[in-house]
């Protein structure tokens, strides 16, 4: 899959031992790291679609730590070499990756497999309660060429 300009993925490594496992999600010595403002976890229940939105200032760094999540990106940036491109990722314990989402790229997600998906995000900017850096569209906005309908067959 051709990645949207500025989008980066990194395969994460699970380190198991007889007590369980450890998985680093983001380190400041990795090239994917820009800055750190805060960390939060967001949950998505089965059948729910959390889409679409973008940020003008911040990069997001998603890691799905429980369940599986389908994360979809859409590049609507006027000056982008990948304008109009859609990327679809399946994140979670079956595919542990870090997904870096640049500013101005629409994104959304839904849970997969009938269980809630828990995503940890490490945004590059603090959330501003008075003036949130979030710009939204409805999940089925016809101007975004993507259908959230599950594909069967």
Image (spheres, grey):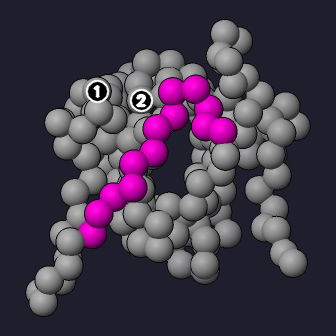
Q: Residue at x 81, y 62 (%)?
A: 149
Compared to 139, does 69 lie above or below? below
At mark 1, the secondary structure is loop
Q: Is residue 15 left or right of residue 93?
A: left
**Pick the front one: 48 or 22:** 22
Q: How crowded is mark 1: few (under 14 residues within 10 Å), some or many (20 or more)?
A: few
Q: Residue furthest bottom?
A: 18
Residue 80, percent across and down? Answer: 65, 16
Q: Is residue 11 highlighted in magenta?
A: yes
Residue 47, percent across and down? Answer: 67, 69
**Pick the front one: 24 or 42:** 24
Q: Is residue 136 visible?
A: no
User: On residue 59, which mark appears?
Assistant: 2
Upstream in sequence: badge 2 or badge 1: 1
Q: Give the range drawn in magenta.
A: 2-14
Residue at mark 1: 34
Res 92 → quadrant:
bottom left
At mark 2, the secondary structure is loop
Q: Which residue is drawn at 54% across and 78% down?
A: 115
Our reading of the magenta stretch's main secondary structure is loop
Q: Which residue is drawn at 70% across and 12% down?
A: 78
Compared to 4, does 39 lie above or below? below
């Amino acid at each position: 899959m051709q990645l949207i300009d500025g989008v980066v993925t990194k395969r994460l490594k699970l380190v198991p031992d007889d007590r369980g496992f450890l998985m680093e999600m983001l380190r400041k010595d990795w090239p994917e790291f820009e800055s750190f403002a805060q960390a939060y976890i967001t949950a998505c229940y089965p059948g729910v679609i959390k889409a679409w939105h973008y940020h003008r200032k911040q990069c997001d760094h998603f890691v799905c730590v429980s369940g599986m999540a389908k994360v979809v990106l859409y590049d609507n940036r006027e000056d982008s070499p990948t304008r109009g491109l859609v990327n679809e990722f399946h994140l979670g314990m079956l595919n542990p990756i870090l997904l870096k989402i640049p500013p101005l790229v629409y994104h959304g997600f839904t849970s997969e497999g009938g269980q809630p998906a828990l995503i940890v995000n490490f945004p590059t900017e603090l959330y501003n309660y008075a003036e949130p850096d979030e710009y939204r569209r409805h999940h089925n906005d016809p101007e975004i060429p993507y259908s959230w309908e599950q594909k069967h067959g």
